[in-house]
Amino acid sequence: MISQDGCAVVVDPGDSAPVLEALDQYKLKLECILVTHHHSDHIGGLETLVEKTNAKVYAPRHPSIPSPFQVVENKELIRVLGLEVAVMAVPGHTLTHLAYFFPQTELGPIVFCGDTLFSGGCGRMFEGSPEGFLASLESLSRLPPETLVCAAHEYTMSNLKFAKAVEPSNRDLDDYVDHCKSVRAKNLPTLPSNILLEKSINPFLRVHLAEVIASAQKINPNAKTASQIFATLRSWKNDFS
């Protein structure tokens, strides 16, 4: 959630209750809702919130997303809370997945990337292709390095366990693991991350590097191209424990 001048925008409300509680607690009016994709844990609270607040909804075109909403597409610019927001198509987790990039907020640039990019990882590839998913991650990686990464789930520790298996000699990763352990021990979130950090520790953004390639090729010796390395990593992560 982002708020400004008594109004708020919320992204991917899987449940209406905590949103309504926050609106009441901070005396905010919900101006609009941004939806990244159609999975139920991202839209479960949508209908109730619209009914109770009359907020405007921006979302990708998909039959599972309840009407009414305004369809938005790649490279479209919208304004919420008086702020410019760039819509980015980031297919891979789902074919119609979007991200919302706020280039200028009080906290600096922020991207809400749903389940495309997590700290230390990325979402499962349910509908997209390896080539498309990798292109989506690369488009996010080209955002300003200070951009805050607001992913939709706190999967960081399990992602970092996998990242260490892929890149055991990555010192930046070691430092981030220690940081995240300390944060989680205090029952605090690891998020948001940022683009600069993710490029230094997230194996799915590092598929061109020698150690990542070597680790992937131990799983699939036939993986040669960047998209094949990515596909191998994603398949490996699916069954990793």
Image (cartoon, rainbow, N blue to C red):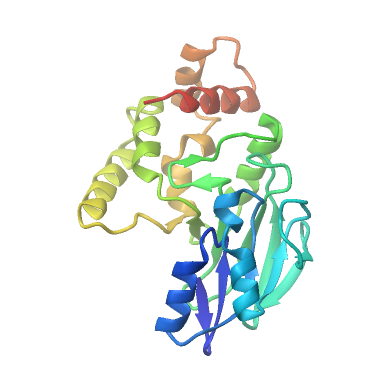
The mark tally for this picture is 0
Q: Residue at x 49, y 78 (%)?
A: 106
Q: Position of residue 185 (x, y in %)?
A: 20, 52
Q: Position of residue 4 (x, y in %)?
A: 53, 84
Using the image, determine if residue 7 lies above or below residue 224. below
Q: Position of residue 6 (x, y in %)?
A: 52, 89
- Considering every residue shown, the one lying at the far top of the view is 221
Q: Which residue is drawn at 25% across and 55% down?
A: 183
Give the left or right position of residue 237, taking residue 170 as reference: right
Give the left or right position of residue 104, taking residue 199 as reference: right
Nearer to us in this view, 19 or 180: 19
Using the image, determine if residue 220 lies above or below residue 174. above
Q: Position of residue 219 (x, y in %)?
A: 49, 14
Nearer to us in this view, 173 or 155: 155
Give the left or right position of residue 143, taking residue 190 as reference: right
Q: Residue at x 58, y 46 (%)?
A: 116
Name the quadrant of the C terminus: top left
Using the image, determine if residue 191 lies above or below residue 81. above
Would you say residue 45 is visible in this rendering?
yes
Q: Residue at x 54, y 40 (%)?
A: 123
Q: In which quarter of the view is residue 193 placed?
A: bottom left
Using the image, determine if residue 61 lies above or below residue 46. above
Would you say residue 103 is visible in this rendering?
no
